[in-house]
Amino acid sequence: MLTDRATVPADRIRIEDREGLVSFFKDVMNWPGFEHAGSTSDYWDWKYLRKPGPKPIGYASWHYGKAISHASIVPTQLMVDGRAVAAGQLGDMYTHPDHRGNGLAESMLERVERQADADGIEIVFAFPSEAGGRIIAKRGYQELPISFAHYHLITNLMFFERVSLGPLKKAAYKAMMMTKAPGRRPIPGMVAEVTDLPDDIDDMTQRFEAQFDLVLRHDRRYLEWRYGDPHGGAFRTLLATVDGRTVGLAVLRPYFMDGAGYMDIVDLMADPDHPQAARGLVAQAIEMATAEGIVEVQSWVPSDHPLVPFLLRAGFMQRTPWAMRGGCACSAILVMGTGRRR
């Protein structure tokens, strides 16, 4: 059903819109699509009300009191060539199937982009689906020349009971892993699981981020919001220290799918002066996964990420994107400077 845009009010979202939007998201897709504490409304509160820093920007179109189209930009901070830049991540861009084909998505995009410009956001970026990528590319977003790679490690040989030619693959994999054993040995006394971040966490993340031309700023407030609130997802945090100083951080996301346990390494950072911290963090994650019966550990990172060698030394292998489980399905970042669309 095509809907005349002029008859569908489009307003900036308010807290009173929460239940209507949550119902819309759940109808369109299984939003947010991963395990978290509380209800879906609690997740909405976490994302749109409790995010530290500038308030998120969201617009929705409504038809007879029901949401039919939505887009949002969540402000964040990027480090670009060492300079802090006000940025925003475009997301939750959905239009109900009955109302597609009449420019509603483009209208929502135009509104959130205009507000982002007014709010002083310099760069808008997105990790779009294939369909979303086509829509935003028409508005001037450009793909960054960043290649992503997916690495995985089988941690429980029962995995091979679930795949074709399992016994043969199991024997070959077991022999190969014997040569990778040193990279999977935890470093005694270096890594511990924590629930609270230390006072010097910002010092470590800044030193790590200085290696990148473009990187999301992982300050303490962001890390506590992103990984410390169970309403935003189920994460576990490992911290590496040397002589009482924080030298590395890994964030893990364990989950179950089709009756088997998996673990994602969703964030991995190490002080450039202490690269052994990366080895210790990866080894500790593998040890935890093995002890808990998890069959596979995976990580999705830029292919030139400085810590990829530590994944490879621990036995991780690169995998094609279509084969990954439970993680990001995107293969590109699209960005646009907010002042460029006029």
Image (cartoon, rainbow, N blue to C red):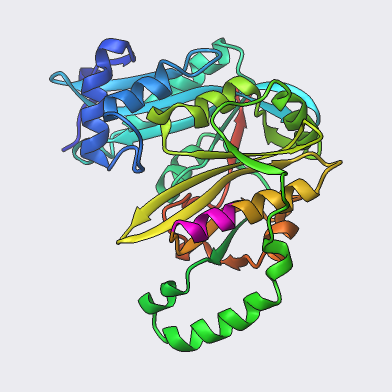
Q: Residue at x 81, y 48 (%)?
A: 275
Query: How many discs mark residues in the rendered view?
Result: 0
Q: Residue furthest right?
A: 273
Q: Position of residue 173 (x, y in %)?
A: 57, 79
Where is 173 relative to 328, above or below?
A: below
Q: Position of residue 21 (x, y in %)?
A: 26, 24
Q: Residue furthest front?
A: 189
Residues in magenta, as a range: 285-292
**Front residue of 337 and 79:** 79
Where is 246 relative to 20, above or below?
A: below
Q: Position of residue 10 (x, y in %)?
A: 30, 17
Apparent side of residue 317 relative to residue 8 in the rendered image (left or right): right
Q: Residue at x 13, y 20 (%)?
A: 64
Q: Main secondary structure of the magenta part?
A: helix
**Front residue of 178 and 223:** 178
**Front residue of 87 and 278:** 278
Residue 189 in sight from this viewpoint: yes
Apparent side of residue 24 relative to residue 331 in the rendered image (left or right): left
Q: Residue at x 65, y 68 (%)?
A: 315
Residue 342 in sight from this viewpoint: no
Q: Residue furthest left?
A: 64
Apparent side of residue 192 relative to residue 289 in the rendered image (left or right): right
Where is 275 relative to 151, above or below?
A: above
Q: Quadrant of residue 63?
A: top left
Quadrant location of the N terminus? top left
Is residue 4 on the magenta stretch?
no
